[in-house]
Image: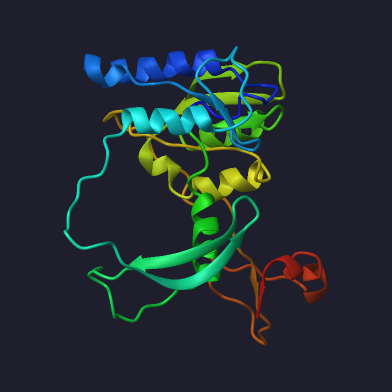
Amino acid sequence: MVNKIDRQDARPREVVDEIYELFLDLDATAEQIEFPILYSVSRDGLAKKELTEQSSDLRPLFEQIVATIPPPRRLRKDSLQLLVANLDYSEYVGRLAIFGVNNSPFAGREGRFVTSRQLKERLDKELLGNVAIRNRLPGGIHRVVTEALGRRKGQMTKMVNHGMGRVRLEFEAPSRGLIGFRSEFLTETKGTGLLNTLFLRWGEWQGALRSRATGSLVAAWARQPLMPSSTIRSEAHSLCGPVPKSTRE
């Protein structure tokens, strides 16, 4: 399923070619690589098998699901029983009934974070870390990301700019250099960047990384001169500027 084909920077045919290349790199069998392809605009609720086709609904998607996925096997002789636990509302499909199957191994047990509101908050939080397949950035911000990854021993291997206002970057970087990078990435891109990481290979040692990018200032009043060599003596009025942005004692 190639989604968002209505976007200005959409390139569905190139995406399909990249998917084929990925399957080849994974040594996919002939049966696995003959997968069905559909194009969609999920926001408008439409799907189609060919880009040139006219479609106004998701009927092609449903038909493909029925034709491709095997029907369910009957696992029990009696009928399925559901226990409605809560009601919710979706702007897309309307009222929803949240239910559980009675034969669940957790049936009758108490737990936390089980209401629809808490589940939604948990899913919204998960979206912060699972947002895309590629690293796609608005134009201009890629320079900041390149500099940030450079400090983490990252090397750019590919940059694609289609002139549509967004840039796709691919880097090779040591795994230890990516620790804590996701939060920095979201901050530098103001939440507009999409990031995904994959293990590539075992590589050579790339050298030491900077362990801390920022420091802290602790100002303390003392009657006697400060003796340790690690401290700096200063007049109180000269600390009026830096102290508010640091730790104060």
Q: Position of residue 166 (x, y in %)?
A: 67, 26
Nearest the eye: 228 or 182: 182
Q: Residue at x 43, y 71 (%)?
A: 84
Q: Quadrant of residue 71?
A: top left
Which quarter shows the C terminus?
Answer: bottom right
- Find the residue positioned furthest to the front: 78
Q: Quadrant of residue 137?
A: top right
Q: 132 left or right of 55? A: left
Q: Residue at x 20, y 63 (%)?
A: 78
Q: Residue at x 30, y 17 (%)?
A: 33
Q: 246 left or right of 206? A: right
Q: Residue at x 30, y 15 (%)?
A: 24
- Colour mapping used in the image: rainbow
Nearest the eye: 225 or 142: 142
Q: Quadrant of residue 107?
A: bottom left
Q: Position of residue 214 (x, y in %)?
A: 59, 54
Q: Position of residue 56 (x, y in %)?
A: 64, 28
Residue 192 in the image: above or below residue 47: below
Q: Position of residue 159 (x, y in %)?
A: 56, 19
**In this rendering, does residue 28 appear at all?**
no
Residue 118 in the image: above or below residue 63: below
